[in-house]
């Protein structure tokens, strides 16, 4: 799939089949995550591959939407702020930016492979931390990953003219 077709085709999928994601597709998606740019290439992240069936009860506590548990896999991008680059001028730590770029690579790679995803930032952080069980990494974003079983919802997007300012 052409890159621009991939961008146009991506949407927040809220329905999945229980068909497994192939190891080959998952590996391609994880390779895309590893290739994501990060500040000074520090790569202060981990991608947790969560088996939905084995972790259904914990995942319900993280994000209770029914469709979140339909996909066979949920991915979590977690970041380590101690390993992330910090801008010298104002000490801004960019771990969240790095992790968001990683998730975007994951989501676009999945779309290119015909799989569905949905950015989840509205989750219970305490339950997410219990699920990944790490003292170093903080859960930043989740996405279900699976074969699509839902139509794209209608949504209005601003035009590029509304979102762009030339100075």
Image: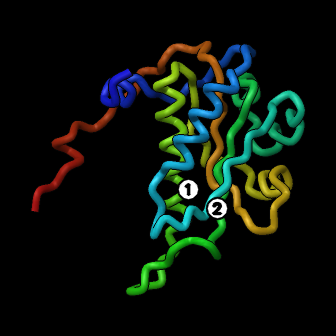
Q: Is residue 108 above or below residue 127?
A: above
Q: Is residue 55 above or below residue 138?
A: above
Residue nearer the viewer, 20 or 62? 20
Q: Which residue is mark 2?
A: 79
User: Where is residue 34 drawn, in percent x and y?
Assistant: 56, 49
For residue 79, which quarter of the picture? Answer: bottom right
Question: Residues at badges 2 and 1 in contact (C-beta under 8 Å)?
Answer: yes
Q: Which residue is mark 1?
A: 99
Q: Which residue is at a point 60% across and 48% down the rendered structure image?
A: 121
Dot 1 surroundings within 10 Å: few (below 14), some, or many (20 or more)? many
Q: Check the picture and name the quadrant holding the N terminus.
A: top left
Q: Which residue is at a point 38% across and 86% down the rendered structure image?
A: 89
Apparent side of residue 94 relative to residue 8 in the rendered image (left or right): right
Residue nearer the viewer, 152 or 140? 140
Q: Which residue is at a point 63% across and 17% down the rendered structure image?
A: 147
What's the CA distance linking mark 2 and mark 1? 6 Å
Q: Earlier in the sequence, mark 2 or mark 1?
A: 2
Q: Which residue is at a point 66% across and 18% down the rendered structure image?
A: 16
Apparent side of residue 24 relative to residue 129 in the rendered image (left or right): left
Residue nearer the viewer, 48 or 161? 48
User: Where is residue 21 drawn, in percent x and y?
Assistant: 68, 22
User: Where is residue 54 drawn, in percent x and y?
Assistant: 89, 32
- Determine whether the residue tagged by mark 1 lies in a helix, strand or loop: helix
- Determine whether the residue tagged by mark 2 lies in a helix, strand or loop: strand
**Residue 73, label in figure:** none
């Amino acid at each position: 799939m052409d890159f621009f077709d991939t961008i146009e085709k991506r949407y927040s999928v809220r329905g999945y089949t229980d068909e497994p994601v192939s190891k080959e597709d998952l590996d391609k998606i994880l390779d895309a995550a590893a290739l994501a740019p990060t500040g000074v290439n520090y790569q202060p992240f981990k991608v947790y591959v969560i088996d939905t069936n084995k972790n259904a009860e914990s995942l319900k506590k993280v994000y209770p939407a029914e469709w979140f548990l339909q996909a066979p896999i949920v991915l979590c991008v977690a970041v380590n702020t101690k390993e992330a680059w910090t801008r010298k001028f104002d000490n801004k730590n960019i771990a969240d930016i790095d992790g968001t770029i990683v998730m975007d690579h994951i989501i676009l790679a999945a779309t290119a492979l015909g799989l569905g995803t949905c950015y989840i930032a509205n989750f219970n952080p305490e339950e997410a931390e219990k699920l990944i069980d790490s003292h170093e990494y903080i859960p930043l974003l989740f996405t279900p990953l699976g074969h699509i079983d839902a139509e794209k919802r209608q949504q209005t997007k601003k035009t590029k003219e509304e979102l762009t300012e030339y100075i």
